Image (cartoon, rainbow, N blue to C red):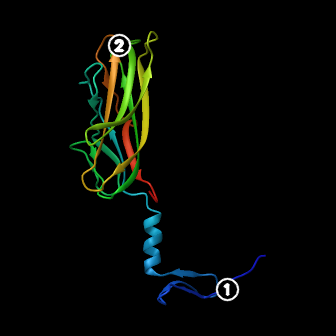
């Protein structure tokens, strides 16, 4: 059974307007309803930080913090360029994504490459490319995780490792190559 409900006003139990209609199809939300709708559709804090210069000081086969000196986005000022940390001041679950462009110093010497996300100095998880006896020159490894953040002191950082058979490895630069980004998930 289908029906039509026609009203010009919705109110809460205390008689406060939630939504009104002018009869011509225009609906007006109360200020409280506007705030609730806006809060439920905002994926912030959000950030995207990246490496703007090659990092030639990478130690072979060692987890190294990746410094990200530039930003494409920092909605709430939660990315600290000086420490390469994201510290949102809003509690919730965050989708954190990272990618590292890992380059061996010499052709056909890259054996393993790792990208890791750390929370408060401890590993959340990682992705690895292993080439074993088929060493290559470069690799791009991405990883993503949903991370619970307390909104006051929790922070995330990017780490990576390059295992080479010879030469000096480095992290490549670029906003689409070596980066970390993330945002607060709605309703989480």
Q: Using the image, determine if residue 48 lies above or below residue 127.
A: below
Q: Which quadrant: the N terminus?
A: bottom right
Label located before the other in sequence (1 or 2):
1
Check residue 106 in the rendering and tell me which mark sits there, or answer none: 2
Considering the numbered disc 2 on the image, is that residue within a helix, a strand or a loop?
A: loop
View extreme (bottom): residue? 15
Residue at the spot 27% in from the left edge and 29% down from the top edge = 64
Is 52 or 65 nearer to us in this picture?
Answer: 65
> Is residue 27 found left or right of 103 in the rendered image?
right
Tell me if mark 2 has few (under 14), some (14-19) or many (20+) residues whose alpha carbon lies within 10 angstroms of its own. some
Residue visible at 50% across and 84% down?
12
Residue at the far right in the pictured view: 1
Of badges 1 and 2, nearer the viewer stands 1
- Residue 168 drawn at (x, y percent): 28, 17
Counting every numbered tag in the picture gives: 2
What residue sits right under mark 1 in the picture? 6
| Residue 133 at x, y percent in the picture | 45, 9
- Secondary structure at badge 1 equals loop
Are the residues at dot 1 and dot 2 in contact (C-beta closer than 8 Å)?
no
């Amino acid at each position: 059974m289908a029906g039509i409900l026609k009203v010009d006003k919705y109110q809460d139990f205390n008689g406060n307007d939630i939504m009104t209609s002018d009869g011509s199809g225009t609906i007006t939300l109360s200020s409280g309803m506007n705030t609730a709708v806006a809060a439920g559709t905002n994926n912030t804090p959000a950030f995207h930080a990246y490496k703007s210069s090659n990092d030639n000081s990478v130690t072979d086969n060692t987890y190294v913090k990746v410094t990200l000196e530039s930003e494409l986005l920092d909605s709430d000022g939660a990315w600290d360029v000086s420490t390469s940390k994201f510290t949102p001041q809003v509690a919730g679950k965050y989708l954190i994504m990272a990618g590292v462009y890992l380059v061996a110093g010499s052709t056909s010497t890259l054996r393993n490459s790792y990208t890791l996300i750390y929370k408060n100095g401890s590993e959340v998880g990682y992705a690895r490319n292993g080439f074993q006896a088929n060493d290559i020159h470069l690799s791009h490894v991405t990883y993503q995780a949903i991370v619970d953040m307390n909104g006051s002191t929790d922070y995330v950082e990017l780490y990576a490792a390059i295992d080479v058979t010879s030469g000096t490895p480095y992290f490549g630069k670029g906003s689409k190559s070596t980066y970390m980004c993330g945002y607060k998930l709605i309703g989480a």
